[in-house]
Image (cartoon, grey):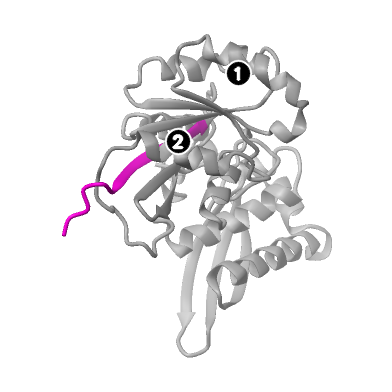
């Protein structure tokens, strides 16, 4: 018998870099599928996550930060984010709770002005400001005439998430279950491994190093009967000096990156991990269209 009350739809999570998009997705799903870092522009690809409820299936698209950029990698990231706006039922626009924020959001607002999907504004990181500051921000946001709902949340602490899910279900159309109930993401384990390694580079290195790094998993083999996965990955950088920093004095940095990545992968994949990391110099890869395709930045 067909369930005529079941709802489903696609929801894009957008915003400027470092506003908490990946943290929000991980919190909604109750598990980590998108890497996070205090540094901006961590997410480079579109990440799909599926939230199954009793009467609805919510399919979220976490996108790279939308910003003006001139670099080859940056342009691909923004193109990926903007493409999501054309294929969803709902857009969640995340912002931080700061005064005069609309000057910084001008580029995003320009793109939202022409979409046909419903748009919710999520004022994130409300745990960082006084509660009395929220009302003026919400009034100012409402005057723009773009948003169907305006909701203060804390993606980190989970505040407002249950209300958000109720609002999302309320606007989604009736539809089928697009993914089986046991599917949380469409990302392959090989991709997740590369992302976890890149996250550790982001969190352990400084200055330009994280942004000059791309991770390519060359080997991902499950050893039958041993509950063991063997992973060989290349950490690509753009200059010899960057290679030296990632390897570190007497190999300390590369060992720390590997150890932290291995422990997290074991938790995520439920198996022992043998992780072999190498560092390669691929000069100016972030401006090379061939290299960008090789590293998965279409």
Disc 1 target residue: 138
Left or right: residue 34 versus residue 91 is right
Q: Nearer the viewer, residue 169 or 145?
A: 169
- Residue at position x 71%, y 41% in the image: 38
Q: Is residue 12 magenta?
A: yes
Specify whether 183 is left or right of 272: left
Residue 159 colored in magenta in the image: no
Q: Position of residue 295 (x, y in %)?
A: 47, 50
Assign a secondary structure to mark 2.
helix
Q: Nearer the viewer, residue 27 or 197?
A: 27
Task: Spot the residue most to the top.
Answer: 143
Q: Is residue 288 left or right of residue 83?
A: right
Q: Which residues are magenta?
A: 1-14
Q: Is residue 258 above or below residue 239?
A: below
Classify mark 1: helix, strand or loop.
helix
> Does the rendering let one see residue 153?
yes
Q: Quadrant of residue 188?
A: bottom left
Q: Nearer the viewer, residue 215 or 288?
A: 215
Determine which of the numbered discs, if any, sits on residue 151 in the image. none
Image quarter where the N terminus lies is bottom left
Residue 292 position, x and y percent, is 46, 43
Mark 1 closeness class: few <14, some 14–19, many ≥20 residues within 10 Å: some
State the residue at coordinates (36%, 50%). 57
Q: Residue furthest right?
A: 249
* x and y, in percent, of residue 39 in the image: 69, 39
Q: CA distance from mark 1 to mark 2?
A: 17 Å
Q: Which residue is denoted by mark 2 in the rendering?
A: 167
Quadrant where the image shows the C terminus: top left
């Amino acid at each position: 018998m067909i369930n005529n009350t079941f709802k489903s739809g696609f929801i894009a999570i957008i915003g400027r870099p470092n506003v908490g998009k990946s943290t929000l997705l991980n919190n909604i799903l109750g598990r980590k599928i998108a890497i996070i870092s205090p540094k901006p522009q961590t997410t480079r690809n579109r990440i799909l996550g599926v939230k199954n409820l009793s009467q609805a299936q919510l399919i979220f698209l976490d996108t790279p930060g939308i910003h003006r950029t001139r670099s080859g990698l940056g342009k691909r990231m923004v193109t990926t984010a903007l493409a999501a706006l054309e294929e969803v039922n709902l857009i969640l626009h995340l912002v931080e709770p700061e005064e005069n924020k609309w000057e910084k959001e001008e580029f995003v607002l320009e793109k939202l002005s022409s979409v046909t999907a419903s748009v919710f504004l999520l004022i994130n990181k409300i745990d960082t400001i006084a509660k009395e500051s929220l009302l003026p921000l919400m009034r100012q946001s409402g005057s723009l005439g773009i948003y169907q709902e305006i909701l203060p949340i804390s993606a980190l602490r989970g505040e407002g998430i249950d209300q958000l899910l109720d609002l999302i279900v309320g606007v989604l159309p009736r539809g089928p279950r697009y993914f089986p109930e046991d599917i949380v993401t469409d990302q392959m384990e090989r991709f997740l491994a590369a992302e976890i390694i890149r996250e550790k580079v982001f969190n352990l290195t400084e200055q330009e190093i994280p942004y000059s790094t791309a991770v390519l998993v060359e080997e991902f083999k499950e050893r039958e009967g041993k509950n063991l996965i063997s992973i060989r990955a290349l950490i690509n950088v753009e200059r010899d000096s960057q290679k030296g920093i990632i390897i570190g004095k007497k190999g300390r940095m590369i060992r720390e990156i590997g150890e932290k990545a291995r422990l997290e992968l074991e938790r995520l994949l439920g198996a022992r991990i043998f992780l072999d990391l190498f560092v390669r110099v691929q000069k100016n890869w972030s401006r090379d269209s061939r290299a960008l395709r090789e590293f998965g930045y279409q």
